[in-house]
Image (cartoon, grey):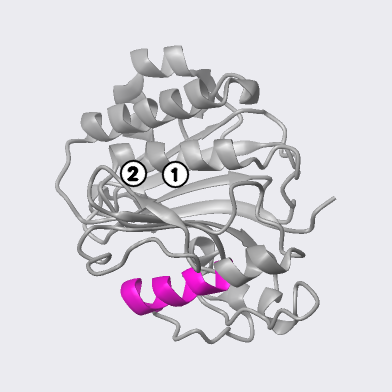
Amino acid sequence: MSDYNYKILATWRIEPTEPQVLGEKFLRALDTIAAAAPEIGPWLVSPRNLSRAVVSIDEAREIMPKILKSSVATVDSTPDPDYGYRLYAMNRRDLSPRNIHLSASVGGRFGDRIRFEVGFIGIPSDPDTVTYPLFRAALLAILDQWPSVWANAYAFKMDYYKASTAPGVPPHAYSRFHLPWLGYLSAPLAIGLDPSPETPGERTPDGGLLMIAAEERLDPANPEHMRRSRAIAEIMIARAGDPKGGLAPANTASLPWATWIT
């Protein structure tokens, strides 16, 4: 069993969007991922993040206005649309290593983030569930619905930056990109960049660049995977920036950005 969590984080530019459109984008992303990876089973949509009450994706289409109304972000227990909406879906009711979930914090005035993950907080991802086709499909589905500034599929575990993950491989420097697997830069950030032996990849339809460390599950014990992952991380840091300067705080979990930085 792996002790890594495999995730995707994408940041969407601030863009005025009607709540109903946000709901439609979320459902279309779910449809695309399900079509590309039918083995994950049907999606369950939660009217509230981690709520025990879930509905099927078909039911969610019928009651999306109600879901949006109950998904407004709260500040001091008061709903505040300025902080956007929290949309959440998963493929299982139990929080297991095979749980796959997509969440979106979108529609606010302070920047939007979309997350995809196998496993859960404190529950490492099931390696058999983490496949290249699944994560590629999920990342491209996110990009298709949300014009992201950058997006990153990656492996993460606490203290990954403190030790080598494979013989002869230096530790990755700490950054918000962690151990990149599939790194995407939007067209403005990818100017002058092309795929190379160090960072194989491809251009996306929007003119961005998708860099690929491995066309299989990213394996932190594989020196070649980690060499390419490190190269992608360095490019992502240089082009998209790292607000923490590559330095890991002493107690990450205590900081307000910890919920999205990992």
Please say whether residue 232 is one of the residues in the magenta stretch: yes
> Is the stretch drawn in magenta largely helix, strand or loop?
helix
Read off the magenta span. 229-242
Secondary element at tag 2: helix
| Spatial CA span between label 1 and label 2 | 6 Å
Secondary element at tag 1: helix
Quarter of the view holding residue 235: bottom left
Position above or below: 242 against 114: below
Quadrant location of the C terminus in the rendered image? bottom right
Lateral position of residue 23 relative to residue 35, left or right: left
Lateral position of residue 230 relative to residue 81, left or right: right
The label shown at residue 139 is 1
Q: Residue at x 69, y 83 (%)?
A: 170
Quarter of the view holding residue 65: top left
Position above or below: 57 against 182: above
Task: Identify the residue under disc 2.
Answer: 143
Position above or below: 177 against 155: below
- Residue type (three-letter) at the residue carrying disc 2: Leu
Lateral position of residue 13 relative to residue 40, left or right: left
Position above or below: 109 against 106: below
Using a 10 Å C-alpha cutoff, classify the residue at mark 1 as few (fewer than 14 neighbours), some (14 to 19) or many (20 or more). Answer: many
Q: 118 or 90: which is nearer to us? A: 118
Please say whether residue 139 is one of the residues in the magenta stretch: no
Q: Position of residue 76 (x, y in %)?
A: 39, 58
The label shown at residue 105 is none
Is mark 1 in CB contact (under 8 Å) with mark 2?
Answer: yes
Q: Residue at x 44, y 12 (%)?
A: 58
